Amino acid sequence: MSNYILLHEKHFNFKKFVQRALKEDVRDGDHTALATIPSDHRGKMQLLVKEDGIIAGVEAAVQTFRIIDKTLSVKVLIKDGRKVKKGDIVFIVEGNTQTLLTTERLVLNIMQRMSGIATKTKYLQTLCKGTETKVIDTRKTTPGFRFFEKWAVVIGGGANHRYGLFDMILIKDNHIDFSGGIVQAINAANAYLKKNKLNLPIEVETRTLNDVKKVLKRKGVQRIMLDNYTPAQTKEAVKLIKGGFEVESSGGITEKNIADYAKCGVDFISVGSLTHHVKSLDLSLKALK
């Protein structure tokens, strides 16, 4: 089983996800498969790649097949994270044909989106080549599908930011404005952690170099976010911080300018479009005669 599944199993129940997805799609029966295919028919299907990219979701597909029917047999030919080209065959699955047809779309929905995210992540990370900068995701994910989207980012060579609201304190502009200022927000966050005996990292969003200077005078912060800074402002901020904190660039960063930000010496670049604005990779599950 994938290390990613094991790492996040307390946050995500794979079996329940598959059961809910099938209930949404199948309800009282896959009547087309039931009507056209004998119940004891056995068949094979192959996962066919229809465009170049990075494949992701192979392990997810294997786990999905196992949950639905343990008797299904999967032969993996290409593993997660590998480059694929049009015409490649990723795996062959064999078993009850009705089950294969019923499962087809769920597996494709997972893999196509994951592969699209992994492909984009790999591309953006490649643009940061020659630096120590890591491309990371955000919480701009599809409700109920976050586990797969964040897993795809890792498969594509990026890294996850926080998984959700529960595993990090990220003080953003609205928190700062509502709490009366950046210093007040930091003080309140540290007091909250102490009172509740929690050990969570704190990240603070800054909008100006003056904000950065204020954060540098406070204790209990691990990461400073530079939100919507220009590359020139980012360089200046990195010089001010001098390695005392992790530094993350965010906001308005695209494939056209990501290299400029990476060269500024930031540790992370968060890109929301990795998960909320991505094209799925074209894949198909076809009968193998």
Image (tube, rainbow, N blue to C red):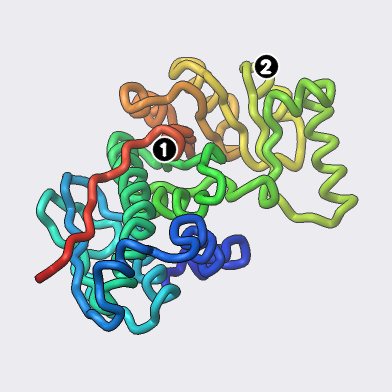
Front in this rendered view, residue 98 or 129? 98
Front in this rendered view, residue 200 or 236? 200
Numbered mark located on residue 15 in the image: none
Residue 244 can be seen in this image? yes
Q: Are marks 1 and 2 in contact (CB under 8 Å)?
A: no
Is 216 displayed left or right of 51 in the figure?
A: right
For label 2, the SS is helix
The x, y position of residue 219, in whole percent, is: 76, 39
User: Which residue is at a point 48% across and 66% down the rendered structure image?
Assistant: 5
User: Which quarter shows the N terminus?
Assistant: bottom left
> Of the residues shown, which amino acid type is indicated by label 1?
Leu
> Of the residues shown, which amino acid type is indicated by label 2?
Asn
Crowd tier of the residue under label 2, counting other residues whose Cα lies within 10 Å: few below 14, some 14–19, many 20 or above: few
Above or below 5: residue 247: above
Instruction: Determine which residue is flagged by label 2.
Output: 210
Numbered mark located on residue 274 in the image: 1
Above or below 77: residue 26: above
Is 208 displayed left or right of 236 in the figure?
A: right
